[in-house]
Amino acid sequence: MPIRDTGAEQLIKNTAKHIFFAEGRLHANTQDIADAAGVSRTLLNYYFRTKDVLIEQVFKEAMLALTTRLDAVMASDLPFKQKIENFIDLFLTEANAYPYQETFLITELNSNSCKYTNEVKPHHIQIFLEQINSEMEAGNIERMNPVHFVLNLFSLMSYPLIMSPIYKKAFELSNEGYGCLINERKKMICKMIFQ
């Protein structure tokens, strides 16, 4: 039995992630991915059989990374405000590098929701919601359903990234200029959510 070249397999996955997450080419085909990785489509098919299998692998790894990061933030012993500041910084820094990752994940969830139900929920979400509630009772953040706090936080971070192609054109911003704008949002978001 031949030994699998896991380096080639990882190269293909990394290339697919770059095409989907950094370039936003969600409809790239296996030939596009193989060409960008510098491998034959036969080799790509050897590891992944179909584009769907490759997408499933990329999705699962991205969701695992996302839920791991969310769990790390939610379970950390840092003061709540610092925890949120660190999370915003981490989220927006990564989103600058991979602006289409959220779009990819949402697209896959919408088209294959039954397939991915176990991959979406962070383990420490209940603890995090209790911490949010405690911060509201202490008067540090506006009182609301704690789920709204999480929705607001992600909306403030994600929406400008999802809409970036439109905003770049509307405000005549380069990629670099828009990146600077996103970096400015890190502090603005904290000011908006903490009283």
Image (spheres, helix red, strand yellow):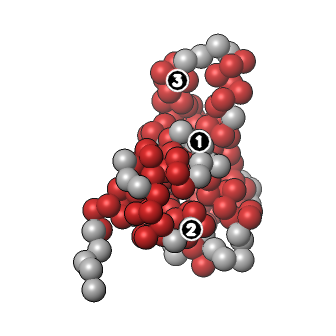
> Which residue is denoted by mark 1 in the rendering?
24
Point out the image quarter for the C terminus: top right
Which element carries disc 1, helix, strand or loop?
A: loop
Q: As rendered, which of 137 and 121 lies closer to the eye?
A: 121
Residue 139 in view: no
Q: Earlier in the sequence, mark 2 or mark 3?
A: 2
- Horizontal side of residue 176 vs 105, given as left or right: left
Q: Earlier in the sequence, mark 3 or mark 1?
A: 1
> Which residue is denoted by mark 3 in the rendering?
175
Local crowd at mark 1 within 10 Å, few (<14), some, or many (≥20)?
some
Q: Position of residue 115 (x, y in %)?
A: 66, 77
> Which residue is denoted by mark 2 in the rendering?
50
Q: CA distance from mark 3 to mark 1?
A: 14 Å
Determine whether 43 is above or below 155 in the image: below
Q: Residue at x 29, y 68 (%)?
A: 6
Q: Residue at x 52, y 71 (%)?
A: 49
Q: Position of residue 50 (x, y in %)?
A: 56, 68
Looking at this view, name the residue that lies furthest to the left: 3
Q: Position of residue 84 (x, y in %)?
A: 49, 50
Q: CA distance from mark 2 to mark 1?
A: 20 Å
Q: Mark 1 is on which residue type?
A: Gly
Q: As rendered, which of 25 and 60 lies closer to the eye?
A: 25
